[in-house]
Image: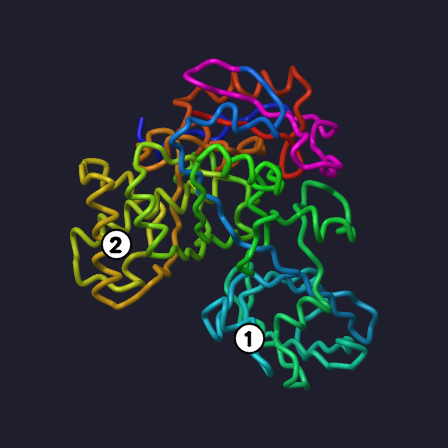
Amino acid sequence: MKTQEIRIEDYNYSLPDERIAKFPLPKRDESKLLLYRNGEISESIFKHITDYLPQNSLMVFNNTRVIQARLLFQKETGARIEIFCLEPIEPHDYALIFQETRRCSWTCLVGNLKKWKEGTLSKTIFIKDEPVVLTADKKKSHGDTHLIEFIWDNEAYTFADILDAAGVLPIPPYLHRETEKSDLQTYQTVYSKIKGSVAAPTAGLHFTPEVLADIDARGIGREEVTLHVGAGTFKPVKSDTIEGHEMHTEFISVRRSSIERIKSNLGNIIAVGTTSVRTLESLYYMGVILDNNPEATSEDLVVKQWMPYDMNNNRLTAERSLQNILDYLDKHDADTLVTATQIIIAPGYEFKIVKGIVTNFHQPKSTLLLLISAFVKGNWKSIYEYALEHDFRFLSYGDSSLLI
């Protein structure tokens, strides 16, 4: 069967609401850890994960930081409008847009859109006890998303300041609760650095400074990449087959030194989270693009959804592919690869770089569950049945697994 013909109903399972963790445990690393090694399933506690990692492993973490992407406005009529910032448009760069001091534009989702037909939304916020007037203007729409221009009247403050003062952290919709103050800390990894995600790379939520120190003490390598998680990560597959599902495009940034280290440790790469998996596997296909077109631009390097399956006869080694990227960076005198990916990893996919995954337990009929099934060669049901039968907690604030 072609990967595109996979029926999403075959990746359904019963997940009772009480098994969805609404809040994290008081101590992150006390969560349960399911171990899947060579087809055998057992369990431990997350703080002991280093006991089960191969000694020569290189763990790759996604250092993205969740932004307070939800902005709430109230019209004079009393109607509440929610604007959810998804992707920077002007300037079209995360680092630059957070530094803007007067105006910027984002692709957004709009809640209660029917109450905002026209006109400008406005609200007064306070930053360091100083009033700042923020306005939002809907410029154009494309399907479910809208181009929104934000303008504020004080150049002393950046858009990062605006979001920190007025934005609400977007926790997953399946938690069925409002964001609480505690989420500002618990819904960030302890190593988060680069602002841009609207959802946390939740596999990383289990790591504590103590676990990271234990990893270092045992001589296991740590490396970081950046993939800003989009709201599309929660988008359910509504089509009967996955061919009808459009993957969201996500921003990727990887330093040259990280690529060199990954290349030197091929065969030993443990990805922390599905976002790190998508980043690492996308790197391979970016190298394939460069192998076919050495003159490719950063726009050309964006990995399209079905590219791995359209090019499944490609036998370029991962080492050669990563070297192509390093050569590309040399050619452009660049220290960081900045591009995007739309990759979907599903059964039939051949992993090129990732040899192990640390990940949580995912929603039924989700693209994340397809990724896990691809990695464990279809054996996801036994893993999930074990987790359900042994009181594992599911989804973003739930327990974890180590798949090798």
Name the amino acid, label 2. Answer: Ile
176 falls in the magenta region: no
Element type where label 2 sits in the image: helix
Which is more toward the observer, 101 or 121? 101
Q: Is residue 48 above or below residue 222?
A: above
Element type where label 1 sits in the image: helix
Q: Is residue 41 above or below residue 309?
A: above
Where, by quadrant of the figure, is residue 310 drawn? Answer: top left
Tell me which segment is drawn in magenta. 15-41
35 falls in the magenta region: yes
Q: How is the image coloured?
A: rainbow
* Residue 351 relative to residue 278: left or right: left
Image quarter hosting the N terminus? top left
Q: Position of residue 131 (x, y in %)?
A: 78, 81
Q: Sort mark 1 into few (<14), some (14-19) or many (20+) by Cα contacts within 10 Å.
A: some
- Circle 1 is placed at which residue position? 99
Name the amino acid, label 1. Answer: Gln
Image quarter hosting the C terminus? top left
Which is more toward the observer, 327 or 51? 51
Q: Earlier in the sequence, mark 2 or mark 1?
A: 1
- Circle 2 is placed at which residue position? 325
Q: Position of residue 305 (x, y in %)?
A: 36, 46
